[in-house]
Image: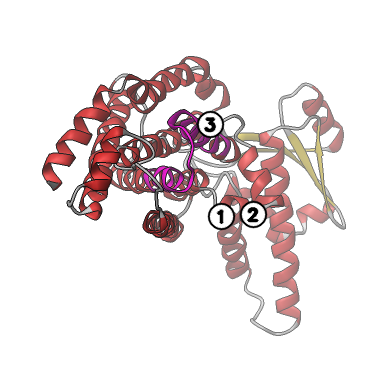
Amino acid sequence: MFFHNFKYTFLTLFKNKMLIFWTFAFPILLGTFFQMAFQDIENSETLHTMNIAVVKTDTFENHNIWKETIQNLSEGSDSLFSTVYVNEEEARKQLEEEDIIGYLKLEDTPKIVVKKSGIYQTIFKSVIEEINAQELMLNQMIQNGDFAVDYSTIYQKIEEITKKEAPILNISRANLSYTMIEFYTLIAMAALYGGILGMTALNQVLANMSHNGKRVAVSPVSKGKLVLSSILASYIVQLIGIALLFIFTIFVLKVDYGTHLALVLLLALTGSLAGLSMGVTIASILKTSENVKTGIIISITMLGCFLSGMMGITMKYIIDKNIPILNKINSASMITDGFYALYYYDTLDRFYFNIVSLLLFATIMVVISIFCLRRQKYDSI
């Protein structure tokens, strides 16, 4: 009976045109629109070495820590800065003509002058502020006798901390892609749309949702095996949809998922399980029509994707800063955050944290579903 119901559910899901559209066609169409809308962004927004100026003052000339740090950040083919050392009048002129993005004047405290706001100016300010903060901390450590005055050690320490903290230095230019963020949320959306499959599959064995469910309710077969086979069939269908999305984005849209493709797939599979479990929970809790349940799943998914950055990449950071708990329970945010962890962090700790979080989310959803299904009773069938 298990394999019979698995086959029946599998074929039924594939014959449902609405399901095929939302879980197969819609993510592919949306991905195509993303590519059309953002295809020129990569060239216009690719981060390059920043042209800056340093005002030659006595303070700067006599300050070996600042001189060495700026020099180190301006060396090499992948340097952060391209630095010119000029007087303040020349620095103002170059800034006005936009030959540089800003300039640094070091006196008692570092003074940063920019003409306008932007990502380059923000990075410039962040790096200078970080160098200043770390220099103050290290000088305090020297005064307290924590270690001897060894400027080579200080340069190394500041450079290590700066590279760790400065956004541009901790990630490769190849991975800093605004378009990729949209594709991360697209995969999250496609994974969570598996909830529609799970909901539809479970409705097939619920007596209040289908004629087949009524027959199941009065039959002597194991309800647990039927539910499990239905969920497994819907998960397989969902994985086919995810596979088609990856094939399309990789070979047609030429999306580069980098060297972590296996982990990307693992995250997508785990996210699909979370989405499926959400759909099963909604199907088991709500006693309403299938269309209403579908609308609820789509609404929850799109709201979660919005909060994770699909309609604006800054939204995720706004939520993280002001309502962090919201993204902790948002499965779409868990998926996109897992992608960020793969490409923007040195270790996989955060990635596996998101994997575990998604599995925990799925487990909680399944437990709630089992509890609700066991309590369901019908006055008549």
Q: Which residues are magenta?
A: 276-303
**Residue 328 has which mark?**
1
Distance, label 3 to label 2, CA atoms, is: 22 Å
Classify mark 2: helix, strand or loop: helix
Mark earlier in primary sequence (3, 2):
3
The residue under the point 25% across, 55% down is 224
Distance, label 2 to label 1, CA atoms, is: 7 Å
Three-letter amino acid code at the position of disc 3: Tyr
Q: Is residue 315 left or right of residue 111?
A: left
Which residue is outermost to the bottom?
145
Q: Quadrant of residue 238?
A: top left
Three-letter amino acid code at the position of disc 1: Lys
Q: Few, some or many C-alpha atoms within 10 Å of disc 3 (few <14, some 14-19, many ≥20)?
A: some
Three-letter amino acid code at the position of disc 2: Pro
The residue identified by callout 3 is 178
Q: Quadrant of the C terminus?
A: top left
Q: Residue 285 lies in magenta, yes or no?
A: yes
Expressed as whole percent of the image width and height from the top left, the position of residue 200 reads 35, 35
Residue 141 higher or lower than 250, as above or below: below
